[in-house]
Image (cartoon, rainbow, N blue to C red):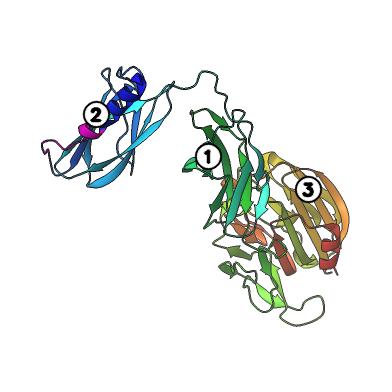
Amino acid sequence: MKKFILFSLFNLFIIVSCKENSPTNDTGTIKGKIIDAKTFIPISGALVSTDPPSSSVLSDSGGNFTLNDLSNHLYNISIEKEGYLSNQISVNVITGKVTNCIVPMSGKVDNNHPPNQITNLIPANNSTINTTTCNLSWSCTDPDNDKLTYDVYIGNDYNNLNKVYSGLGTSQYSLNDLTNVTYYWYIAAKDNYGAETKSETMMFEVNLNNPDEPFTYFPFDGTINDNSSNHWETSSYGTNFIQDRFGAPNKAINFNGNSNITIHDTKASDYQGYDITVSVWIKPKSSCMNAPETHIALVADNKAKLYFGITKKREMEVWTTSNRWVGCKEPIPNDTWTHVSFVLNQSKEFCSIYLNGELAVSGALPKIQTNQLVKIEIGSRTWINDHYCGGMDELRVYRKALTLDQIKALAK
């Protein structure tokens, strides 16, 4: 009975104390006092925050706190302190007024246990999403059967994720307006005593392009236009159109040993973490293959050194970082259309080269330094005056590793 009377009087004290005092400026102020709900002793060092957000403060040795320069608004005041259950009250701030409040905090249960491990996180780690929306879901239980809430963290930097939702009452959350980047996320489960369990950090990537379509595609049918759904902006220097391998006029392109095509609006992040396949028909010209080394290239700066190409001896090769490469000693014939494919599997750090649909060579190759890729050039590496000489047709670049059957189909 005594506890009931004290509790009733305490609630009445809170209601009476939340009153408006003398005006200050043209903004409002909240002054509060935080006390132990059982002993009425002031609590120092409690974190006070608001929603809508304002400055966060700690209560002083007397349990007092002040929040200044608040707009005319209803604020939810949240109080957190180690060893106590978090508490929240609502205070209506009026311009030119000071509102006083007392906030009680109850101690935690000594034998409380944190939530169990968070499981069944969806989407699974390393998944690929092909839409602008994604539904996150997970499972979690509590050993004490406490009610659980969840904080959702997500971002593009593994080491710096943002809390996008706090106190979610269900085990699912919808993401919208996703873009072609990699996302990291984790969930923090909390019981009603403040005990917390965090999930592992998950990763998924968004690919809004059809993965079965080329990310870049040049049929060279009388134009240098990119015919992929990206429609990259391109320009050329010193090229002209020739017959393709079927004898159709102006259906392939010719590089004269000093020419190139540049794709201007591809960014390094477009290849972050992706496997890459380059598929192309080439016809090296015997009259000018004594030029310096020649390449069909994804061009990086002189630190990244990534290209797919052929040497002046017409040997296929792929380079990535640290002067690492995979090459094929079987020369491509001059003055003959030949299909070549390069498959760089970055997740396995492995590269394969195919000649007319058949595996020619394979080997280990490090991941590319995508932060240093600057642009794509076709038929050249202009920064070292390195140019291809001969015909080219049906150039495709995929952000995936094609299968052998897919490569055979392109080589027909």
Q: Is residue 217 above or below residue 329?
A: below
User: In the image, what residue type sits under mark 1?
Assistant: Tyr
Q: Which quarter of the figure is the C terminus placed in?
A: bottom right
Sequence-first tag of 2 and 1: 2
Tag 2–tag 1 contact (CB < 8 Å): no
Badge 3 vs badge 1, beta-carbon distance below 8 Å: no
- The local crowd at label 3, few if under 14, some if 14 to 19, many if 20 or more residues have their Cα within 10 Å, is many
Q: Residue at x 72, y 55 (%)?
A: 400
Q: Position of residue 104 (x, y in %)?
A: 33, 26
Q: Disc 2, disc 3: CB below 8 Å?
A: no
Under tag 1, what secondary structure?
strand
Relative depth, front residue between 200 and 324: 200
**Mark 2 packing: few (<14 Cα in 10 Å), some, or many (20+)?**
few
Q: Quadrant of residue 251?
A: bottom right
Looking at marks 3 and 1 on the same chain, the residue that comes earlier in the sequence is marked by 1
Chain part drawn in magenta: 15-24
Q: Label 2 amino acid?
A: Phe
Q: Is residue 311 visible?
A: no
Magenta segment, prevailing SS (helix, strand or loop): loop
> Which residue was labeled with disc 3?
351
C-alpha distance separating marks 3 and 1? 43 Å
Look at the picture and state if 294 lies above or below 322: below
CA separation in Å, label 2 and label 3 = 74 Å
Q: Quadrant of residue 17?
A: top left
Q: Is residue 33 left or right of residue 96?
A: right
Q: What residue is disc 2 on?
A: 13
Mark 1, residue position: 150
